[in-house]
Image (cartoon, helix red, strand yellow):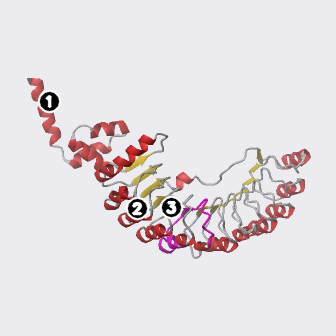
Amino acid sequence: MEKEMMDNSIEGCISCLSDDCLLSIFNKLESESDRNAFGLTCKNWFKVRNIARKSLIFHFSFDTKVYKEHAQCLPKMLARSPYLKLISLAGLNELSDSALYEVGVSGTSLQSFSLYSCSGITDDGLAQVSIGCPNLVIVELYRCLNITDLGLESLSKGCHSLKSLNLGYCTAISDRGISSIFRNCRNICALIISYCRGVSGVGFRGCPSTLSYLEAESCMLSPEGMLDISSGGGLQYINLYNLRSSAGLDCLGGVGSMKKLRVLNLRMCRYLTDDSVVAIASGCPLIEEWSLAVCHGVRLPGWSAIGLNCNKLRVLHVNRCRNICDQGLQALKDGCVRLEVLHIHGCGKITNNGLALFSITRPSVKQMVDEAMSIGPSIEDLFRLQ
């Protein structure tokens, strides 16, 4: 009897706790298991747990049943969690535009919104999010194949504070959509357009100086587009890995006008010529890391220009370059006074004597045989909510 009275007394005290008090208690819980247990205590505590939820993340799964369950429960979870700052949804191919309605209704606190391989989402769904979430600073639409220029226009008109945008594999977009982003989102810092073959680069014309990071792997950029990409004047990192060319021409000379450039990835740019290398080496005085791996068009004039002009270069990648020889390596040895790391392997025209002479003359330069696929800052860091 006494135990029952004590239990009732405790329950009465708990029920008297205000939501603000419960929120204060909940925020002191560090582990996710403790937070989940908190929400299972009673209906009111479940409500408080949902109010306190700041992020909603659905990871990739190899089980199609899991995806279906996620798609079905998402609207409920969104309706119960009105103060989310981050939403990340991956692999939900069956997710429809209607499921994003709750995001638009209660999304004023939302700052980061990510859709990975959610191919069922169209411009209509993105428009709902854009209208209801004006404070978005990070948006990822990786492999959202049904997003077009119309969706990007809606996004740019609703989310002027946008800073980081991932459009990788959004194959239905073009320069028109890119142009609308730059026209309306003047604080954008990071953009990914990898494998967007419909983008030539002319949509970058007049891009803001805040744009400092660009990923454009396997894109089909034009010479005019490359010049427009450099028009903002703020790029410090650019990845042009495996750049394509419809005409089979070198369009990379425009990179030479990027005066603030520090990291440049030109790995597997098969159309790159010495002319562009000379322009880049002489026009980008701040460059610190440069990948020219598998760039067979770079010959002695290019290597000589790098040695002569790249005084701040610390890391250079020349793996599997067919046309770097002992003379080219000597030009790098005699110049590049701050070189710390040289990634070199599979260069058939360099002899053992050439490598030995480089090692003796520049013993402080670390020679590495590994071939780096990506260089520079981490994408995760650029798309992480601060």
Q: Which residue is mark 3?
A: 164
Q: Which residue is mark 1?
A: 7
Callout 1: helix, strand or loop?
helix
Quarter of the figure with the C terminus: bottom left
Q: Is residue 386 visible?
A: no
Locate residue 39, reporting x and y percent. 28, 40
What residue range appears in magenta? Answer: 179-201
Residue 113 or 287: which is nearer the viewer? 113
Residue for point 24% across, 37% down: 41
Callout 2: helix, strand or loop?
helix
Q: Which residue is mark 2?
A: 125
Residue for point 76% across, 44% down: 369
Tell me the CA gap for discs 1 and 3: 52 Å
Furthest residue to the bottom? 206
Q: Position of 107 compared to 150: left or right? A: left
Furthest residue to the left? 1
Residue for point 31% across, 61% down: 105
At label 2, the amino acid type is Gly
In magenta segment, residue 200: yes
Mark 1 Cα shell of 10 Å, populated few (<14), some (14-19), many (≥20): few
The secondary structure that dominates the magenta segment is loop
Instruction: Tell me if label 1 and label 3 are in contact, CB under 8 Å.
Output: no
Indicate which disc, 2 or 3, sits on the residue closer to the N terminus.
2
